[in-house]
Image (cartoon, grey):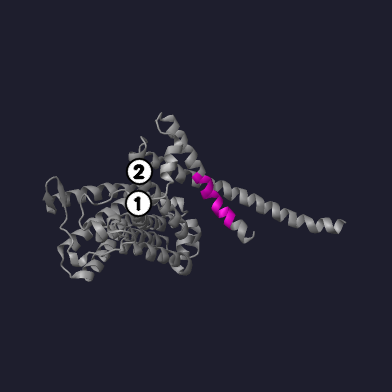
Amino acid sequence: MNTLKRIGFALLAPVIAVLIAMLATSIVILASGSDSSAGDFWSVILAKPENRIMVNIINQTSMIYLSAVAAAIGFRMGLFNIGVEGQYTLASYTAATFAGAALLPGAINVFASLVIAMAVGAIWAGIAGILRTTRGVSEVISTIMLNSIAAILVGYLLDQYGEHGGNQVRTKALHASSQVPGWVPFEDRDGAIWTLGLLAVAVGIGFWVLLNKTRFGFDLRATGLSQTAAVASGIKVNRMVLVSMLLSGAVAGLIWMPAYFGSAYTYGTTFQAGLGFTGIAVALLGRNQPVGMIFGAVLFAFLSAQSNSLVFQTDISPSVVQITQGVAVLAVVIAYELVRRYRIRLEQRSVARARTAPAQEVAA
């Protein structure tokens, strides 16, 4: 199969998924009886973003991509780390508490806080890894439970040790010397692109190198495809499971750090929840591939940012966008399988023609 055909097959499934998602969303809007039409919805969603929204899309993409990589590390191993949400929640609170205490100066405080965030995320994910390897507990069950425990624990700690003001409770504000200035591509009122968003770039490159250029990456992919074959080849599966969960949790710990050091400066009402579950969806949409997840992260960030305009320009609820995102994830899974089967049939026909051609020439 030539290069153009391979690219075509790679793009076919996502295109089919997007078209199905658009069709399903349009049907939902029509069925809802809204005064605004499906055309109004898509004209708002697909409009050119304003400068402020463009900055928001870029910033959101960085966090969503980090979340997707955290989930993908487990998926490539055959593990379903549903606990990314809890891991980055607890890691974000811990890092914000440490950074706000200003025990270290400036950039050193930033670096130490990032290390702490990764360590806390890894430890929280490691609990599920240990339960899986020592007791056979499904990581799906343990990580879901750990999500709830993390949320309750952070809520308790924040209430007990946070700063109370009015109806808000938060960690101590980050000192100005540790705030990381961003890049302002437009006007100041449009906001800045977070500098620590570059963490997403570094993690994406690191994930690609890990998968394709290291022995660990080979063992990771081999174990994800078949644990039985991995054991037969000498791979220590339990160790791989634990290390994969630790790596996944470490990346999860970084998810909210660009926002914290770039604009939030405290953990409280500024914390953005839900990124862990969004990352899982994007990982599935991008097929756990470093490049594929980039497009998935941009798509989800774009849809979420543009949905805010629906409130002002239509009477369609922004939650309709969640239907688009959910259908896109479901459709891409089905579309990839259909495209895979179609490609196999084409290859079988090509091989059959190649084998029959010499026989026909001899008979002639």
Q: What residue lies at 27% left-to-right and 55% top-to-bottom?
A: 189
Q: Is residue 296 above or below residue 236?
A: above
| Residue 316 located within the stretch drawn in magenta | no
Q: Of 20 and 286, which appears nearest the observer?
A: 20
Residues under numbered marks 2 and 1 in contact, where contact means CB atoms less than 8 Å apart: yes
Magenta segment, prevailing SS (helix, strand or loop): helix
Residue extending farthest to the right is: 364
Q: Residues within 10 Å of mark 1 (few under 14, many from 20)?
A: some
Labels in figure, total: 2
Q: Of 106 and 144, which appears nearest the observer?
A: 106
Q: Residues within 10 Å of mark 2 (few under 14, many from 20)?
A: some
Residue 318 visible in the current orientation: no
Where does residue 278 sit, x and y in percent of width and height? 37, 49
Q: What residue lies at 48% left-to-right and 41% top-to-bottom?
A: 22
Residue on which the image places disc 1:
53
Q: Secondary structure at mark 2?
A: loop
Query: What's the amino acid at mark 1?
Result: Ile
| The N terminus - image quarter | bottom right
Q: What residue lies at 61% left-to-right and 61% top-to-bottom?
A: 3
Q: What residue lies at 41% left-to-right and 28% top-to-bottom?
A: 33
Residue 309 - label: 2
Residue 267 - label: none
Query: What's the amino acid at mark 2?
Result: Ser
| The C terminus - image quarter | bottom right
Q: Is residue 149 above or below residue 291?
A: above
Where does residue 222 sit, x and y in percent of width and height? 49, 61
Give the spatial CA distance, label 2 vs label 1. Answer: 10 Å
Q: Secondary structure at mark 1?
A: helix
Q: Which residues are magenta?
A: 7-18
Where does residue 84 sit, x and y in percent of width and height? 33, 53
Where does residue 230 sit, x and y in percent of width and height? 48, 61
Residue extending farthest to the top is: 33
